[in-house]
Image (cartoon, rainbow, N blue to C red):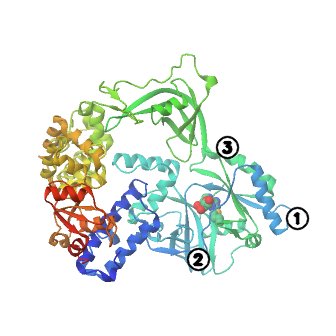
Amino acid sequence: MTSPEALSPEEARAELERLASRIAELDEAYYRDDAPLVTDAEYDALRQRNAEIERLFPDAILKNSPASRVGTAPSSAFAKIRHRVPMLSLDNVFDAEEFAEFCARARRFLNLPASPRFVAEPKIDGLSISLTYENGILTRAATRGDGMEGEDVTANVRTLRDVPQTLHGEAPGFIEIRGEVFMSKAAFLELNETQARLGQKIFANPRNAAAGSLRQLDASVTASRPLALFAYAQGESSAPVAETHWDYLARLKEWGFIVNPLSELIEDENAAAAFTTRIATERSTLPYDIDGVVFKIDDLSLQRRLGFVGRAPRWATAWKFPAEQATTVLEKIDIQVGRTGALTPVAHLQAVNVGGVLVTRATLHNEDEIARKDVREGDTVILQRAGDVIPQIVSVVLEKRPDSAQPFAPLEHCPVCGSLAVRPPGEVVRRCTGGLTCEAQVVERLIHMVSRPAFDIDGLGEKSIIEFHRDGLVSGPADIFRLPTREEEIARRDGWGALSARNLSQAIEARRSIPLDRFLYALGIRRIGETNARLLARHYGSFTEWRTQMLAARQIGSDERLALGSITGIGPTIAEELVDFFAEPRNIDTLDELAGMLTITSPSGGLSSAASDSPLNGKTIVFTGTLQAMTRPEAKARAEAMGAKVTDSVSKKTDFVVTGTDSGSKAKKAAELGIRTLSEEEWLALAGEG
Ligand code: IVH
């Protein structure tokens, strides 16, 4: 990779464009999908390169620079804070025997004649935080990060009610206090309800919700989320504050912190098991999730002598509980129909409390999973909730199976529209073939269409779509954009009113203009997620061009079909989904009706001026053979940054074929079609590297 110093201003601009779009893609995967595409180190390296180029070429800084982006909070958007004392984790034990071994190890290490005293505290399922106070005033708050370095979340933490801004009473001039930020079960369920109403991200469990709420670039979002804190440990301190952990907890309370009220002094190791058993029985009635009990040797001088092994102290351990289980009756296996017709079996259960959360449903994933566990309607089943709200079915209690219980038979027809339901060979999912005649698919598509990464219509979430559809206000996509003409009718609806109806109309009007990539995503075509929608939008550039090309691509073997399948990242399977969509005349009608009500603009994150001036702008280019000076991905990125489209196979539409060493059939095809081929040297010259 060219070092930042060696870049020309044009190259710097192109590189910043490339970095911005790559970082946005990675952020999306990490924050929205919880599915990171690269390691943290690789991600950080990209951000560092971006920062370095911005420093050297301040004129080239983009308006949407990753360095200034607000919204999803990339970890590196927070300043790093190095912990003066590392924030460690705890080793686990799972039963009395393992706990006895932990005690024996500590006693051997210290040559103690008798068991030391312990403090026991519930192990809260949240995220740990370090709070620094200087002269009694909160000056810094950091997440644990990798234990050595965390993120500076001071502004966010200042909005937490349980965090004192100043310490009450006497305290050392410098002191770092540690504790757990968490969200109560009730607050978590309420937050998810609000999120669902607004069509926004649903959190899987209270811990995720707490972490997501704390790591917000906009502190007012954190302030609106009900986060709580229990204080439980010390970091660096300019003067000692206690001789025992128990006394330290008392000081924390004096200073204004909340210490978990269930914490207790445990006289010796024999008393530990009784405490654990008691907390385990109280667990489901506690207002917050816990996953065990932490035992800490009380005497701080013993703690100092014991020190650490690896990343965990020798003076503390976590006695972990098993996942929370409950037994109930599975009343019915229901089949849900998704946006693309996927049929998902869902278990309807006799309501049961699993770890303090009332559960009435569990996912059964697919028909193979049901067969594997031999789950039947009427069965008594064991459920398990491991922090998450949706439980899993662990097993069936066979002794309780009613004689009448029948094995689950996969449906041959869609339960909503009655169309044939098919399971293609090699796939686990069965699908309804009804397409737009299936009401379930229609509603799911509408919900998808208004969701955040698509049209992002404020105030129009899942619940409203279901109701509007039920009452005939929207039956297809275009009806969304007719809602403003029915504002008065909406205002009269239950739970609405003039103001919210007005706001909805405005939110809809504001989205009549939409970038092509979002529009393509909003269509909800199978396998066209945000990334593929962006690839298509970049490749075709305009709605009209895309539409024309797709219609032509219906012809098997056509140039347009070949070109579609050879867009890097698209490939034949995705091409087929698009062609299938265009093979259905009603889809085209729906598409045209919708498009007619909108202004579809060029893809978001358009080309830089460097790209539009470049000789490659708008050209289609194929790389073949081995390049010496740069890898294939780098060559591709370079060409795209200069406005070119890179495809995998040669067709009439190809403008250039760059031939490295050992280029075979593609070079031959180019020659046959009379397409200009470039040597690596010629390509480098074009790319500004020659
Ligand atoms: S003490 C060196 N006390 O558990 C000991 N940790 O597995 C530092 N946790 O990262 C931790 N409740 O996030 C301690 N009462 C408690 C805790 C607790 C929850 C979390 C904490 C830590 C993790 C270690």
The kind of secondary structure element at disc 3 is: helix
Instruction: Tell me what residue is drawn at x 50 percent, y 51 percent.
Output: 206
The Cα atoms of the two marked residues, 3 and 1, are separated by: 33 Å
Instruction: Residue under label 1, please give it.
Output: 113
Q: Horizontal and vertical percent for residue 274?
A: 76, 48
Identify the residue under disc 3: 281
Look at label 2 and name its amino acid.
Arg
Which residue is depicted at the point 43% across and 61% down? 38
Q: Establish whether ligand 1 lies closer than 8 Å to the Cβ of label 1.
A: no
Q: In the image, residue 628 lies at what x, y percent?
A: 33, 71
Please give the residue where the numbered disc 2 appears in the rendered image. 84
In the image, what residue occupies the spot 40% across and 53% down?
33
Q: In the image shown, does 254 or 410 lie closer to the viewer?
A: 410
Residue at x 56%, y 72% (from the top left corner)? 148
- In this view, the residue farthest toward the right is 113
- Amino acid of disc 1: Pro
